[in-house]
Image (tube, helix red, strand yellow):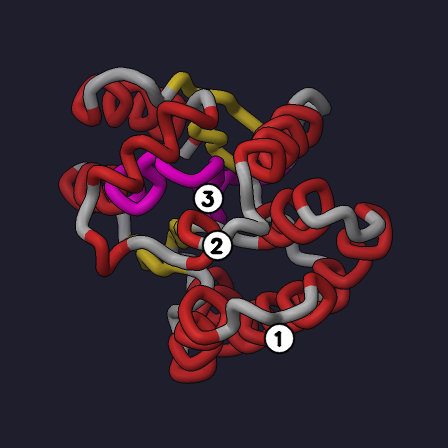
Amino acid sequence: MPRPVRFITIEGPDGSGKSSQARLLGDRLKREGFDVVVTREPGGTRLGEQVRDIVLGAGRDLDARADAMLFSAQRAQHVAEIIGPALAAGRLVLCDRHRDSTIAYQGYGSGLDVVEVTRLQDLATGGLLPDLTILLDVPVDVGLARRMKGPPADRNKFELDDGFDMAYHERVRLGYLEMAANGGRWRIVDAVGEPAIVAESVAGIVLALV
């Protein structure tokens, strides 16, 4: 990695434990003395939280292109308002989902042109790329079972709507694995095990690089 690791993203298919692992990693980094901003997408800003309500809840009839553009719009604001200033101030940024989620879900999953979706992310982020992306990988059936066993309020259209079936989630997972196969900023962590064990694997990767 040619530059210091300051911008870390956690990605993965539904039920891979991203939010929990982001929280655990953020706590670990703070204990280690790092000045870290922990944030999420969609979310992180007022616009992001409004978009989150639309795309994950009420927006069940949205076209995939509308989904991609809404996710990207909140991302542009997130970079401008939270991520960019924190990085400029020398802080560490840890984000639960970022640009690769839109490429995986609306590109590979929904069938939009992956190259075009990637260009949209370049526009939304001003060309900003994470320094390190942790892919929490789980088989689709394991991840969806976790989501369905969790609190009903945590489920969204990607688990509840018939249009997002097993085949859709398989395409998302394979898209992630295809992106991660390029190496570079990507590290793959098997997220099937107990959260504490997964957290140690994630922390080991991150602490070795920051």
Q: Nearer the viewer, mark 2 or mark 1?
A: 2
Left or right relative to 14: residue 147: left
Residue depicted at 20% across the width and 43% down the height: 150
Q: Nearer the viewer, mark 3 or mark 1?
A: 1
In three-dimensional space, the C-alpha distance between marks 2 and 3, rounded to whole angstroms, equals 31 Å
In three-dimensional space, the C-alpha distance between marks 3 and 1, rounded to whole angstroms, equals 20 Å
Is the residue marked by circle 2 packed among few (<14), some (14-19), or many (20+) residues within 10 Å?
A: few
| Label whose residue precedes the other's in the sequence (2 or 3) | 3
Q: Which is nearer the eye, 119 or 2?
A: 119
Q: Can residue 91 be seen in this view?
A: yes
Disc 1 target residue: 73
Q: Which percent across, then down, holds residue 129?
A: 64, 50
| Label whose residue precedes the other's in the sequence (2 or 1) | 1
Quadrant in the rendering for residue 208: top left
Describe the element under mark 2 as helix, strand or loop.
loop
Describe the element under mark 3 as helix, strand or loop.
strand
Q: Does the magenta stretch include residue 6?
A: yes
Residue depicted at 45% across the width and 58% down the height: 157
Q: Nearer the viewer, mark 2 or mark 3?
A: 2
From what the image shows, is residue 72 above or below residue 95? below
Q: Which is nearer the eye, 99 or 109?
A: 109
Q: What stretch is highlighted in magenta?
A: 3-22
In three-dimensional space, the C-alpha distance between marks 2 and 1, rounded to whole angstroms, equals 24 Å
Which amino acid does the dot numbered 3 rest on? Ile
Residue depicted at 54% across the width and 40% down the height: 165
Is the residue marked by circle 1 packed among few (<14), some (14-19), or many (20+) residues within 10 Å?
A: many
Mark carried by residue 161: 2
Disc 3 target residue: 8
Which amino acid does the dot numbered 2 rest on? Asp
From what the image shows, is residue 16 above or below residue 159? above
Quadrant in the rendering for residue 71: bottom right
